[in-house]
Image (cartoon, rainbow, N blue to C red):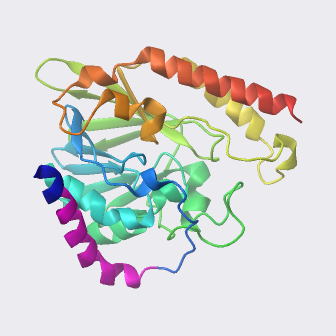
């Protein structure tokens, strides 16, 4: 019954968004060949005041504070109704969103950002190296740009630099500059707590390689190899209790949590899994360098 109500709520809210979206900026979002990107997923509490409100694979995170809420990532353009429904299912309101963040400036994480910003008036904060891409809707992205906007452009309210702190209410998030996947890919490190303990949380943007070109064949990003090397080295040294990422599949969400499962922060305390992911990405990077 809960599953039925959840799906029905998403549909109703989706219809209410239809007229608003019709007036949004015209963009050409790449065809979605990943069904799990748009598939709804039941929202849940990860740990303390941190919640999952994304789709089956496109991870979106809600951080609830005493002065309003923070939303990290928004999935595809059509995801806005789902995110709103997910928040409401957890007892929160989209209108209370005060800060918008993203782990990377690609359409599968920025798609609904402009609509949500317009609806809430929230401030968009972006790693400075992704600011131009966000401002032109992805058109200047080194890998997927050059053919027009792939998502609606978003006005940036604050440029973030490595180590900058984002403060809202009782929360402080540190942005970590982790370039390569995009020029301004980034991760976030912060603490949450429940009645049992405090948890240091890492929302990591894993440095996957998205270009088929050799690194030397990308004039628009001459430092790409250097940036990937920096990011992989920096991510190996991070300390945390819980780790999450931009895609649910990257941190094994569906093996750690099933819809209807109870509250279990310990399910996401997986240093071994993180190290294995970084090791695999290091191997991919090394192979890429050898393929010049």
The image quadrant of residue 76 is bottom left
Q: Is residue 82 magenta?
A: no
Residue at x 54%, y 19% (from the top left corner): 276
Q: Quadrant of the C terminus?
A: top right
The vertical placement of 213 against 32, above or below, is: above
Looking at the image, can residue 168 be seen?
A: yes
Residue 99 x %, y %: 33, 54
Instruction: Tell me: residue 149, above or below residue 276.
Output: below
> As drawn, is 177 to the left or to the right of 58?
right
Q: Is residue 17 magenta?
A: yes
In depth, the one of 266 and 35 nearer the eye is 35
85 lies above or below 27: above
Closer-to-camera residue (269/14): 14
Describe residue 100's horizontal placement relative to residue 107 as left or right: left
Q: Point out residue 26 in the picture as x, y percentages from the top left corner.
A: 52, 80
Give the number of callouts: 0
The residue depicted at 36 percent of the width and 36 percent of the height is 173
Asked whether, in this view, residue 261 is left or right of residue 146, the answer is: left
> What span is colored magenta in the figure?
6-24
The answer to whether residue 91 is visible is no
């Amino acid at each position: 019954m809960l599953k039925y109500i959840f799906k029905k709520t998403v549909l109703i809210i989706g219809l209410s968004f239809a007229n608003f979206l019709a007036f949004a900026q015209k963009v050409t979002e790449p065809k979605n060949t990943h069904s799990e990107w748009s598939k709804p997923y039941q929202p849940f509490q990860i740990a303390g005041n941190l919640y999952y409100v994304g789709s089956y694979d496109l991870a979106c995170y809600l951080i609830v504070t005493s002065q309003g809420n923070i939303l990290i990532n928004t999935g595809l353009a059509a995801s806005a109704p789902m995110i709103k429904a997910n928040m409401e299912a957890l007892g929160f309101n989209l209108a209370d969103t005060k800060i918008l963040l993203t782990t990377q400036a690609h359409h599968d994480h920025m798609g609904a950002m402009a609509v949500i910003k317009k609806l809430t008036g929230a401030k968009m904060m972006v790693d400075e190296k992704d600011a131009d891409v966000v401002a032109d809707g992805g058109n200047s992205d080194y890998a997927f740009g050059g053919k027009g906007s792939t998502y609606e452009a978003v006005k940036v309210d604050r440029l973030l630099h490595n180590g900058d702190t984002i403060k809202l209410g009782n929360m402080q998030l540190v942005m970590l500059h982790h370039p390569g996947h995009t020029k301004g890919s980034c991760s976030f490190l912060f603490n949450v707590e429940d009645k049992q303990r405090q948890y240091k949380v890492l929302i990591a943007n894993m440095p996957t390689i998205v270009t088929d070109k050799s690194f030397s064949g990308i004039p628009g990003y001459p430092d790409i190899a250097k940036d990937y090397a920096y990011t992989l080295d920096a991510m190996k040294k991070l300390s945390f209790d819980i780790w999450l990422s931009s895609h649910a599949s990257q941190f094994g969400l569906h093996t750690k949590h099933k819809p209807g499962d109870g509250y279990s922060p310990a399910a996401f305390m997986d240093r071994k899994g993180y190290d294995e992911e970084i090791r695999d990405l290091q191997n991919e990077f090394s192979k890429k360098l050898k393929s010049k």
